């Protein structure tokens, strides 16, 4: 079972608990809980440390997992030592707490909780070299833990080892792009849109590792704008860019972009892929046998994400475009669109890259930025392109509807597209 499948299974399991929705299930997962059994063993105090959990809710969860009248599972010697260490540590009795930690480590040298307490004690005592040793051991024991890397980065930062600490924070974000603490510790990285006049009205650009909707109705140049961003990032900043088109073939897209003045041969840092390139299964054969409308039994979203991971491992990938979500939806059969799209967006974030999703606005009257009405809440940002008729002409306008953690103007600006590229016109 893949890591993504494991994660989804755990989140769904947590969502069976009373009072637990998607966000709270994610908070438990991000806190390191991997099963209901782990939650039950952790107890009320540990659960209340998770974002959004109070003591009442924590007690309800524990009571649900270990109903009254049923004896709790007996504690192992390791757990007894760890609990004693935590209690002593909380009371500021560091020396005694360390003795209990050593007792736990004799029982189990790979006790991640004991090693974590050990590192925290040394860190609080400002013995950052010893804290570093403990946290390095923690990373060895739980290499998939972004928290372990965050703590190691903090210990290194306290010793003035800035480059090493930043590498730890970047690795933590690669494991969990939603790790806000790692993001805060790193200097904010932003990607330029290469739309003249726009980036300076958006704190310098789009925050790295965001999932951004580029929405508009037919003919609003959504694909061209996204292509412009990826093309220029790859050409001028050597960002590894992957553009996946699900509506046009690669050849058709390239012909269109060449007519707009782009020269894809001028950069080697950009890959343009179409539906037939999803080589995890024989997509081309499948389309011939079943037709695009008969995708039953195929997890197209997983196939697409797997292909992106393949690109990331072999070619590298800093920024991704999926064009379009409407085409992807036509290949998928949703039973619960809200939940399934949540997991799809989470898996996109888990890639640790910046993602642009081209999305068609279907309502002729209402500004709904996704087919199912939930995409705009799941996305980190929304760039809206629209056309307005003036006489016999249809003029383009661009507005930034949403961009988290970014000061941006909410006005719509005329958008000019010519041989020099894209530009917004401000008064």
Image: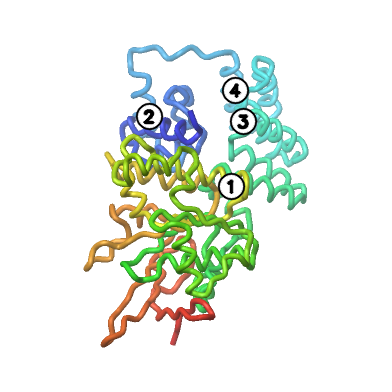
Residue at image mark 2: 13
At label 2, counting other C-alpha atoms closer than 10 Å, the crowd grade (few under 14, some 14-19, many 20 or more) is some
Q: Earlier in the sequence, mark 1 or mark 4?
A: 4
Residue at image mark 3: 142
Q: CA distance from mark 4 to mark 2?
A: 26 Å
Report the side of 54 relative to 77 (left or right): left
Q: Position of residue 15 (x, y in %)?
A: 35, 34
Closer to the eye: label 1 or 4: 1
Q: How is the image coloured?
A: rainbow
Q: Earlier in the sequence, mark 4 or mark 2?
A: 2
Residue at image mark 1: 312
Closer to the eye: label 1 or 3: 1
Report the side of 2 relative to 162 (left or right): left
Q: Earlier in the sequence, mark 3 or mark 4?
A: 4
Out of 291 and 65, give the one closest to the viewer: 291
Residue at image mark 4: 82
**Helix, strand or loop at disc 3?**
loop
Q: Earlier in the sequence, mark 1 or mark 3?
A: 3
Q: Is residue 205 above or below residue 299?
A: below
| Residue occupying the point 39% across, 42% down | 300
Closer to the eye: label 4 or 2: 2
Out of 282 and 172, give the one closest to the viewer: 282
Q: CA distance from mark 1 to mark 2?
A: 30 Å
């Amino acid at each position: 079972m893949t890591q993504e499948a494991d994660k989804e299974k755990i989140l769904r399991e947590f969502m069976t608990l009373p009072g637990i929705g998607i966000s709270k299930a994610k908070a438990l997962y991000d806190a390191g809980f991997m099963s209901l059994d782990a939650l039950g063993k952790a107890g009320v105090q540990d659960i209340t440390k998770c974002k959004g959990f109070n003591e009442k809710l924590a007690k309800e969860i524990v009571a649900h997992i270990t109903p009254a009248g049923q004896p709790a599972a007996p504690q192992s010697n390791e757990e007894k030592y760890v609990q004693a260490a935590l209690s002593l540590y909380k009371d500021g009795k560091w020396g005694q707490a360390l003795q209990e930690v050593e007792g736990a480590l004799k029982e189990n040298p790979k006790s991640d909780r004991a090693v974590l307490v050990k590192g925290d004690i040394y860190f609080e005592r400002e013995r950052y070299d010893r804290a570093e040793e403990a946290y390095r051991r923690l990373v060895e024991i739980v290499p998939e833990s972004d928290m372990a890397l965050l703590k190691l980065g903090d210990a290194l930062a306290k010793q003035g080892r800035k480059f090493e600490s930043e590498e730890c924070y970047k690795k933590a974000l690669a494991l969990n792009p939603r790790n806000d603490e790692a993001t805060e510790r790193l200097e904010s990285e932003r990607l330029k849109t290469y739309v003249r006049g726009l980036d300076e009205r958006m704190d310098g650009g789009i925050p790295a590792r965001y999932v951004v909707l580029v929405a508009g109705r037919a003919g609003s140049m959504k694909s061209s704008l996204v292509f412009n961003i990826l093309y220029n990032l790859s050409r001028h900043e050597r960002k590894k860019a992957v553009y996946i088109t699900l509506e046009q073939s690669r050849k058709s897209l390239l012909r269109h972009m060449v007519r707009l003045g782009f020269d894809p041969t001028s950069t080697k840092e950009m890959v343009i892929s179409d539906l037939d390139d999803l080589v995890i299964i024989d997509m081309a054969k499948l389309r011939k046998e079943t037709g695009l409308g008969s995708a039953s039994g195929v997890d197209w979203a997983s196939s697409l994400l797997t292909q992106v991971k393949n690109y990331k491992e072999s070619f590298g990938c800093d920024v991704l475009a999926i064009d379009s979500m409407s085409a992807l939806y036509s290949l998928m059969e949703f039973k619960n669109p809200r939940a399934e799209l949540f997991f799809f967006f989470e898996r996109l974030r888990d890639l640790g890259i910046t993602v642009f999703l081209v999305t068609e606005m279907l309502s002729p009257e209402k500004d709904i930025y996704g087919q199912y009405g939930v995409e705009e809440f799941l996305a980190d940002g929304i760039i809206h392109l629209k056309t307005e008729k003036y006489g016999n002409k249809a003029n383009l306008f661009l507005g930034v509807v949403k961009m988290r953690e970014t000061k941006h103007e909410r006005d719509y600006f005329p958008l000019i597209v010519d041989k020099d590229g894209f530009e917004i016109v401000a008064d």
